[in-house]
Image (cartoon, helix red, strand yellow):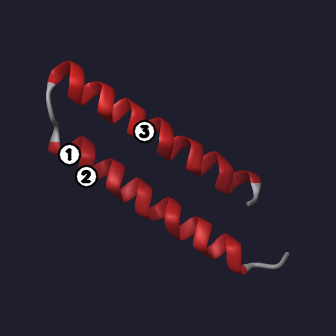
Amino acid sequence: MRGSAKAMAGCTVGGLVVATAYTVALGGNGWLWFAWVVLGLVTLGVLATNGTRRV
């Protein structure tokens, strides 16, 4: 895993923590969870593309 992929995965995990804390403290927000799901899908795409490169 390259550095940029690690950073993106870290941001995704951090986003999950923030989204969970926000939901616990202030209640659910659909847009927040939607944004996190999109971020997670982009991260999976980056990890999948990064794994196929042999550079």
Q: Amino acid at mark 3?
A: Gly
Q: Give the Cα separation between the discs numbered 3 and 2.
A: 12 Å
For the point 22% across and 24% down, which residue is it? Answer: 24
Residue that badge 1 annotates: 31
Examine the image and state in which quarter residue 10 appears: top right
Q: Image height check: is 3 above or below 54? A: above
The answer to whether residue 35 is left or right of residue 9 is left
Residue identified by numbered label 3: 15
Q: Nearer the viewer, residue 35 or 51?
A: 51
Q: Mark 2 touching mark 1, by CB under 8 A?
A: yes
Position of residue 18 measured from the top left corner of the image (x, y, whole percent) = 38, 30
Q: Earlier in the sequence, mark 3 or mark 2?
A: 3
| Disc assigned to residue 34 | 2
Residue 47, position in %: x, y?
60, 66
User: Helix, strand or loop at disc 2?
Assistant: helix
Amino acid type, mark 2? Phe
Q: Earlier in the sequence, mark 1 or mark 3?
A: 3
Please name the residue shown 48% across and 36% down the image: 14
Q: Residues within 10 Å of mark 3 (few under 14, many from 20)?
A: some
Q: Amino acid under label 1?
A: Trp
In which quadrant will I find the N terminus?
Answer: bottom right
